[in-house]
């Protein structure tokens, strides 16, 4: 509830309003042709038509925004869910077991620097032109941030707590469940928040080249028709969806980490 109240504070909107006002004035000053840099009001009108089919000025996109958003959201959700399950499971195993760390981590560290976009040709060859290559790329983008943060969370767990749990008869499974995982949760949620941002970036990239639907596809397709108002509306849609995804994770994190609120020092809210 507190986070929602902070969201409503007016100072949060000062910078966006100033950016939009400056953008509107610059676009209307004639420094650049309006077609190359549409004003925010023009972008907003195109966005509204994309959503509600007001006057059909976005042509074949009119009224299809919700379907494009649902297509992209499905790919993000599927890839992100797979990445979360695998990364958290593997991260806990690597952070807890020295043998697993020595056996698996070097291979993962070799794969990690490879940009996910470089997998696009193989993803298309393996999965074709459909949802699967996009889901695969989303998985790659989200997997490593979640994995590394999970490993960090497990490794930094207070060893005194683990020893205390072992002294009262706790087995490996109990120590992991009741001590290590709760202690690692802040790091895991940090990885999830990084991962969801990467997931949105990768699904848009995949939709540009490997899928024929979604917000990323609309962005790339409208670019070919020089509809930069729709391009900017698509970019704004991606930003909005990414922000809402992050907000959802923050709300889940706040509920899951209620025990931490009394021990964490927060900065002044002003």
Image (cartoon, rainbow, N blue to C red):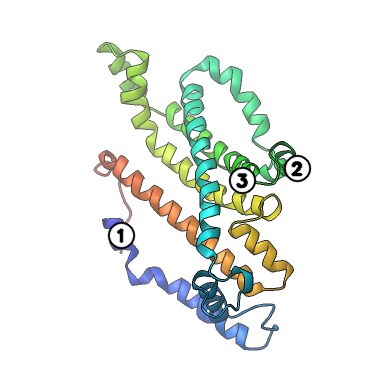
Which dot, 1 or 3, sits closer to the camera? 3
Residue under pointer 3: 131
Looking at marks 1 and 2 on the same chain, the residue that comes earlier in the sequence is marked by 1
In-front residue for pair 227/100: 227
Residue under pointer 2: 121
Looking at marks 1 and 3 on the same chain, the residue that comes earlier in the sequence is marked by 1
Q: Tell me the CA gap for discs 1 and 2.
A: 42 Å
In-front residue for pair 106/75: 75
Q: Say what secondary structure mark 1 lies in.
A: helix
Q: Horizontal and vertical percent for residue 125? A: 75, 39
Q: Say what secondary structure mark 3 lies in.
A: helix
Q: Horizontal and vertical percent for residue 190? A: 44, 43
Q: Tell me the CA gap for discs 2 and 3.
A: 15 Å
Few, some or many residues within 10 Å of mark 1 (<14, 14–19, 20+): few
- Say if residue 167 shows up in the picture: yes
Q: Horizontal and vertical percent for residue 225? A: 72, 71
Marks 2 and 3 in Cβ contact (< 8 Å): no
| Residue at x 68%, y 62% (from the top left corner) | 220
Q: Is residue 217 left or right of residue 236?
A: right
| Residue at x 52%, y 48% (from the top left corner) | 74
Q: Say what secondary structure mark 2 lies in.
A: helix
Q: Quadrant of residue 102?
A: top right
Which dot, 1 or 2, sits closer to the camera? 2
Looking at marks 2 and 3 on the same chain, the residue that comes earlier in the sequence is marked by 2
- Mark on residue 4? 1
Q: Is residue 118 left or right of residue 85?
A: right
Marks 1 and 3 in Cβ contact (< 8 Å): no
């Amino acid at each position: 509830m507190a986070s929602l109240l902070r969201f409503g504070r007016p100072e949060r909107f000062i910078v966006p309003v100033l950016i939009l006002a400056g953008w509107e004035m610059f676009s209307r000053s004639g420094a650049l042709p309006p077609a190359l840099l549409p004003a925010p009001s023009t972008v907003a009108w195109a966005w509204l038509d994309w959503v509600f089919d007001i006057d059909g000025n976005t042509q074949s996109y009119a009224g299809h925004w919700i379907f494009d958003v649902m297509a992209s959201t499905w790919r993000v959700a599927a890839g992100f869910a797979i990445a979360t399950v695998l990364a958290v499971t593997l991260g806990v195993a690597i952070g807890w077991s020295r043998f697993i760390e020595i056996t698996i981590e070097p291979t993962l560290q070799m794969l990690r620097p490879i940009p996910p976009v470089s997998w696009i040709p193989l993803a298309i060859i393996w999965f074709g032109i459909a949802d699967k290559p996009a889901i695969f790329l989303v998985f790659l983008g989200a997997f490593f941030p979640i994995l590394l943060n999970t490993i960090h969370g497990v490794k930094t767990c207070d060893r005194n707590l683990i020893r205390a749990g072992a002294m009262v008869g706790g087995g490996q499974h109990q120590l992991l469940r009741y001590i290590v995982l709760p202690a690692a949760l802040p790091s895991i949620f940090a990885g999830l928040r990084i991962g969801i941002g990467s997931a949105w970036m990768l699904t848009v990239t995949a939709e540009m080249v490997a899928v024929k639907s979604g917000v990323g596809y609309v962005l790339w397709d409208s670019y070919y028709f020089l509809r930069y108002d729709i391009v900017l509306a698509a970019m704004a849609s991606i930003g909005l969806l990414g922000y809402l995804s992050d907000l959802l994770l923050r709300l889940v994190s706040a509920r899951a980490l209620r025990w931490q609120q009394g021990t964490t020092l927060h900065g002044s809210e002003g």
